[in-house]
Amino acid sequence: MIGITGSPTSTSSAPLIVLEGLEGEVREEEVVLIENAVGNKILAVCRRGTGINDNLKVGSYSPGVAYARSTGSTPSRSKESYYYTLSFIGAIDGSGVKRNDLIVAPGSRVYSFNGSGTNPLTFMAHESCAFKGCLAERREWAIPFDLRYASYHIGVFGTTGSGKSCLARSLLIPLLRESGFGVLVLDWSGMDYAPYFKENTIKISEFKVDVDVVFAYIMEKTRKFGYRGEVSTLSELLEEVLAESWEGLLMNVREPKNVLQTLKSALSAKLAKQEGSKDGKWIGLAQKRLETYWRKLKPEDISHLMGTKPIESSLPKRGELVVIDMSSVGSYEKLAFFLSLSEVLMTKISRGEELSIALVIDEAPQYCPSEPKGLQTNATDRIKDLCALGRKHKLCLVLISQGMAGEIGINAAVRRNLNTQFIGQIHPLDMEEASKWLSPYGINIESLLYLERGNFYFIGKMNPSPTPLLISFEVDGDGR
Ligand SMILES: Nc1ncnc2c1ncn2[C@@H]1O[C@H](COP(=O)(O)OP(=O)(O)O)[C@@H](O)[C@H]1O
Ligand SMILES: [Mg+2]
């Protein structure tokens, strides 16, 4: 026994007055048991620890403070108390945990599970739950995750260095794999997953790229051959040449240097053909521009457009893991790859297939920021579609982001589709958004600014507890 409930109480929370001498035994975010004098047993989380001593109250005259100041010792502790606010998980009945519908009697006894060998979180688990990670304050207690709701999508939020990628590597990926999902990770920088899962990693440059991406890339690298407008004779001819010969080049000429040479010769030949029909001087200028700007294309630029693996082949089977290392190419190609990948997934969904795939998107604001631009607009729309349709086809999206809302966050329409949240240490700019999620449960929002790395509030559909739990996880020696 660690204390008794104080007053006032309700059906969802109650103050806990800690017994004298046990102040050092009870920790914030620990799970305890209330033996409600009215009849039932209730699991609850300790929140907002407070210590009060009326003799030492500052702000107005108090004999206790005067005594403490003059003697340097504390006055009587008779007016001292320590208490927590208990946020209820639910009432324990024979088969699990139910919503508590009885008022807790003030003065009910409260017990700790510490040292009992019992993980109180097992009371609320049912068949569709799997255990992973641990409660941050009691690392021997594993956390139940309700896998029925994995396809309701997951959001992971926290500042840089708060441990988001670690959470994905050490907890979410193993959890999803063990529960029958194939996990596909998009590693934007190639530094968060690829080095840890070398044998499961495929480089983005190995995949086949759509011809329109090749076209857009060449136009960008050659600065549109120096023309201001989007469309020029050279751009039109390039489109033609690529449509006619790109597939063939991939099959036959594997040397990037030769591919560049062949494309240039074909363009030059097409230009020459036009000489008769158009103003010769003008064609001469185009030839010169081709000569000048084509030099900006290096063999290594073109080599990562020459992959031949179809994207379908990257899709993991149940229980498998595939990491795509996207580090070798620019943002445009990364987003283009994502769009091709999502097209493959959408086709499968429209055929009514069950996917059993979890798609982990780290650095999600690169794909779907609050104000998407260029290809991000298409990526954002696609993520929304995948969220909406994926639910019925066992597709689980895991979006990982530094910020929640606003400039540093992810698109509001996408965010609405994430029904399970992991919230780690946050940026002060996000306090308002985080407070919408956590304040109703008595969590002190300022404490989110100092959360230790690797600690996350777990809230939402996958959490069998209605009140958030502060969870953590172990990192293996090799970082997984
Ligand atoms: N549960 C944990 N226990 C110990 N160290 C952790 C834990 N979680 C994260 N870390 C450490 O925090 C650092 C940053 O983690 P990372 O996942 O890269 O952060 P983020 O992706 O949020 O920027 C890592 O070097 C890792 O060693
Ligand atoms: Mg990271």
Image (cartoon, rainbow, N blue to C red):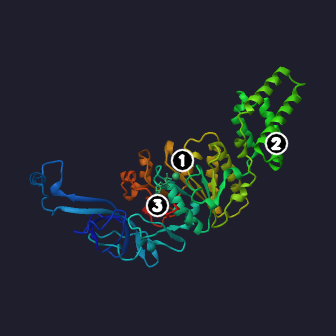
Tell me where residue 116 appears, x and y as whole percent: 36, 77
Q: Tag on residue 181?
A: none
Tell me where residue 123 appears, x and y as whole percent: 44, 74
The residue shown at (59%, 66%) is: 177
Residues at marks 3 and 2, CA–CA distance in whole angstroms: 50 Å
The residue shown at (67%, 45%) is: 333
Q: Earlier in the sequence, mark 3 or mark 1?
A: 1
Q: Quadrant of the N terminus?
A: bottom left
Q: Amino acid at mark 1?
A: Ile
Of tags 1 and 2, the one toward the viewer is 2
Quadrant in which residue 258 is drawn: top right
Which residue was labeled with disc 3? 458
Tell me where residue 72 appears, x and y as whole percent: 12, 54
Q: Given the current orientation, which residue lies at the most extreme bottom position?
A: 94
Q: Amino acid at mark 2?
A: Ala
Where disc 1 sits, the SS reads: loop
Q: Tag on residue 410?
A: 1
Residue 230 shows up from this direction: no
Where disc 3 sits, the SS reads: strand
Tell me where residue 128 appears, x and y as whole percent: 55, 71
Residues at marks 3 and 1, CA–CA distance in whole angstroms: 19 Å
Which residue was labeled with disc 2? 243
User: Where is 76 relative to 338, above or below?
Assistant: below
Q: How many marks?
A: 3
Of residue 229 and residue 349, the one placed in the foreground of this image is 229
Q: Amino acid at mark 3?
A: Phe
Residues at marks 1 and 2, CA–CA distance in whole angstroms: 36 Å
